[in-house]
């Protein structure tokens, strides 16, 4: 709770609002997002709660494929490649291909 109050005080000073308003804003955030902040539950389920895993995944999926020397992508081309790459790396390619829109295949 002291951390919450300290954050609220700083926000109140920065935004020139009443401290009670700042505290209400901070408490509202926690109230609104309490389902997303069940960190102990997520940890016991073996889920990651930090951004490091996501950042590493982006580096692996995007960086290794899209940022190769000499590559030049259109937005639609890069998106198509990255969607396919994500499906392959997550071992969901068969489901991805079954759901793929045949109209998009003829446009390529």
Image: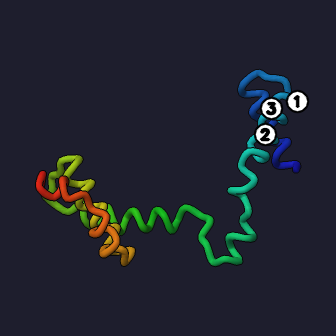
Residue at left offset 66%, top offset 77%: 45
Asked which quadrant contains residue 63, the reply is bottom left
* Label 1 with label 3: CB-CB less than 8 Å: yes
In the rendered structure, which disc, 2 or 3, sits on the residue that comes first in sequence?
3
Q: Residues within 10 Å of mark 3 (few under 14, many from 20)?
A: many
Describe residue 100's horizontal placement relative to residue 60 as left or right.
left
Describe residue 19's horizontal placement relative to residue 66 as left or right.
right
Q: What is the x, y in percent for residue 89? A: 34, 74
Q: What is the x, y in percent for residue 102? A: 20, 59
Q: Nearer the viewer, mark 2 or mark 3?
A: 2
* Label 2 with label 3: CB-CB less than 8 Å: no
* Residues at marks 2 and 3, CA–CA distance in whole angstroms: 10 Å
Q: Nearer the viewer, residue 13 or 59?
A: 59
The residue at the far top in this view is: 16
* Residues at marks 1 and 3, CA–CA distance in whole angstroms: 5 Å
> What residue does disc 1 label?
20
Q: Nearer the viewer, mark 2 or mark 1?
A: 2
Question: Quick check: 26 above or below 45?
Answer: above
Q: What is the x, y in percent for residue 68? A: 20, 62
In the rendered structure, which disc, 2 or 1, sits on the residue that comes first in sequence?
1
Q: What is the x, y in percent for residue 34? A: 75, 53
> What residue does disc 3 label?
22
Residue at left offset 31%, top offset 64%: 99
> What residue does disc 2 label?
28
Residue at left offset 62%, top offset 65%: 49
Question: Quick check: 36 above or below 95?
Answer: above
Describe residue 58's horizontal placement relative to residue 30 as left or right.
left
């Amino acid at each position: 709770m002291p951390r919450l109050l300290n954050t609220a005080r700083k926000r109140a000073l920065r935004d020139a609002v009443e401290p009670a308003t700042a505290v209400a804003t901070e408490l509202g955030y926690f109230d609104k997002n309490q389902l997303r902040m069940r960190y102990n539950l997520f940890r016991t389920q073996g889920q990651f709660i930090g951004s490091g895993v996501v950042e590493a995944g982006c580096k692996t999926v995007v960086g290794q494929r899209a940022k190769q020397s000499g590559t030049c992508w259109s937005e639609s081309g890069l998106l198509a490649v990255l969607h396919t790459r994500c499906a392959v790396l997550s071992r969901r390619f068969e489901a991805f291909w079954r759901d793929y829109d045949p109209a998009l295949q003829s446009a390529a």
